[in-house]
Each structure stands twice: as structure tokens, then as C-alpha cells.
Image (spheres, grey):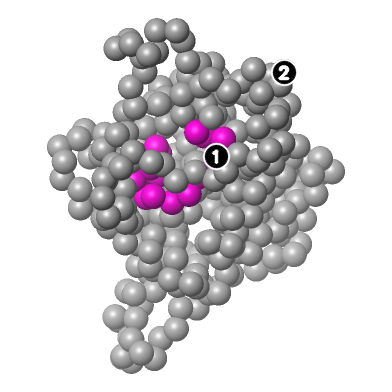
Amino acid sequence: MTLADISEHCHNITNSYLAVTNGSELVESTQEAIRLTRYHLLEEVFSRWDPFGNQLSFSYNGGKDCQVLLILYLSCLWEFFITKTRNSQYDSQYHQFPLQFLPTVYINQAETFNTLEQSIESARERYFLSIYESPRNQTSMPEAFENYLKVHSTAKAIVIGIRYTDPFGADLCCIQETDSGWPQFMRVQPLLHWTLANVWSILLYSNEEICGLYEKGFTSIGGINSTVPNPALKIRNDDATSCGKRNPFEWEISNAYGKETPCNKVKVSKLTDADEVLLQSTGQLDFHPGWFLINDSLERAGRIRR
């Protein structure tokens, strides 16, 4: 497996989802979200900065939004490569995928869950990420990016998986300069228009391994001292009856890409022993999976200080 292979795989996942015709309004809205993100990347971003020329970097923190954007970004890398190959005077056998690793920055600002750290490491290997990790708690976020740009001086823009519903996201646009007090680079934010339901739909359909914390009721993952399972997903006594929560993504999970036979199993990373003990000690194990929540306004309800 190479970066070219996983990019082609992500391209196949994306095309497979875009070909779905099951009549679901959610799938249709997610397909529209994907098309707009692909337009931003292929027509606006890649035409401005060569994705194979070390001008673009990818910001990754192991969360669901970043993973969805990474799948779409790699898919577009493959599309961009194939298009250039087709437009060349030389046959495809004379073209080689230009990147071996994807330049990636991980801004590590707080003590994180072991499960998330292992998920990021797994993503590094699977998606061929060349990750620069900032020192934990030693720098501010602007300073962390400044240090990254000192190491990657050719980087002109950084791709970020923020959405309109995230804090400070409402007034952003797809391509914009950094604010005052930040190092100068262009922020590329092609996921702004996505809803929480859109994110879960394609991520669960992708059949890619996701962080195991999401199976335990987390919907937005920050530091250990500021994140708990989402209270809106707490299992109540009546959840065993018809009043209980229903999984909105049964179709995506059952028909996920690459499954030979339909099943309701989601591919998640293993919860580490340390995190298992932490959740047990605080009585935070009885929660529905994070993908049971589709209300954007409640997505960050688990971001509280203990």
C-alpha cells in the first residue's frame, strides 16, 4: 500500500457514495456537500497551489471532521493526478504519483485520550501522513503553526476541517488569510457547509476505522480534562423500549463500502485500557454511540470541564 493506493481507495469510496440512489434526503444532502467540497478543492485550491509541490499542508487531529476531509482530500488528489495523466502526451505507464507522504500538522494543545493518540498513529500509517506534532502545552496555537512553517517553509496554505457550526466558524469562508497575531498563511476550509449528519453519513459509509471514543458516546473530542461523553446520548431506563434512541445511519453502516454482506458492525479503534479505566471511574460508560446524535446544536455538549 502506498499514498497513491490509499488515494485511489478514497476516490473509489467517494464515487461509490455519490452513486447511491436510495432516496434518502440525508444521503442526497451529503452528496451535495461532497460535490461542493470537491469543487472547492479541485477548481479553487489545487488550481492555486500545486498539491504535489509542497505548497499545501493538511491539519489533522484525529477527529471525525478531519477524517472525512482527509478522505475527500485524498480522493481529490487522485482525481487531480488522473486528470493530469489523461491530459499528458505520454501514456499513463510513464506517470508516477508525485507524493509518498502527505505533509500534515498536528497541533497538540492538551492532554489527550490514549485512544485518540493511537487512532492518530493508526491514521498516520494508513493514510501515509508525514506528521509534524507540536510540543504539548508548550506553545500557543499561533506559535505552534509558526514553528511548523519554519520547518515547512514552502507551505502557503493549510487545509483545516472546521465547519460553520464550530466555535468561531460562522463567519469563515473557504479560503482566507489568517487573522492578526497569527503567522501568515492561507486557511483552506472546504468543509464549512457540512452538517453533523453529513459527516456521520459518509464516514460510516466509508467503512474506514474511526476513533473508538465515538462508539462510547463522544461526539466532539478535546482534552481529557475538558471532554466527556455527550450527555444527550446517556442511556435512560426507557431506552430498551420503543422510546429509545434509534440509529439514524443503519443504511450507511449496513451497506458500507467494501462490505461483502450487510451487517451492523462499525469499524472502530480499540478503547485503550487507560481510557476504559477513566470512563469506568467516572461512571461514563452507558452511552449510545456518537453517531446516534445528528443535532448540530448538541454536538459539543460533552465539551465541559470536570
* Residue at the spot of label 1: 212
- Are dots 2 and 1 in contact, CB under 8 Å? no
Magenta highlight on residue 51: no
Q: Please say if 245 is above or below 211.
A: above
Per the rendering, the mark at residue 301 is: none
Residue at the extreme top: 238
Which of 283 and 182 lies nearest the eye of the viewer? 283
Magenta highlight on residue 204: yes
Q: Main secondary structure of the magenta part?
A: helix
Per the rendering, the mark at residue 306 is: 2
Which of 194 and 290 lies nearest the eye of the viewer? 290
Q: Is residue 25 left or right of residue 85?
A: left
What residue is at 40 percent from the left and 86 percent from the top? 95
Q: Quadrant of the C terminus?
A: top right
Cα separation, mark 2 vs mark 1, equals 21 Å
Which of 65 and 255 lies nearest the eye of the viewer? 255
Residue type, mark 1 in image? Gly
Q: Is residue 141 left or right of residue 7?
A: right
What residue is at 74 percent from the left and 40 percent from the top? 109
In what element is the residue under mark 1? Answer: helix
Q: Please say if 127 is above or below 245.
A: below
Stretch in magenta: 199-215
Residue type, mark 2 in image? Arg
Mark with earlier residue (2, 1): 1
* Closer mark to the observer between disc 2 and disc 1: 1
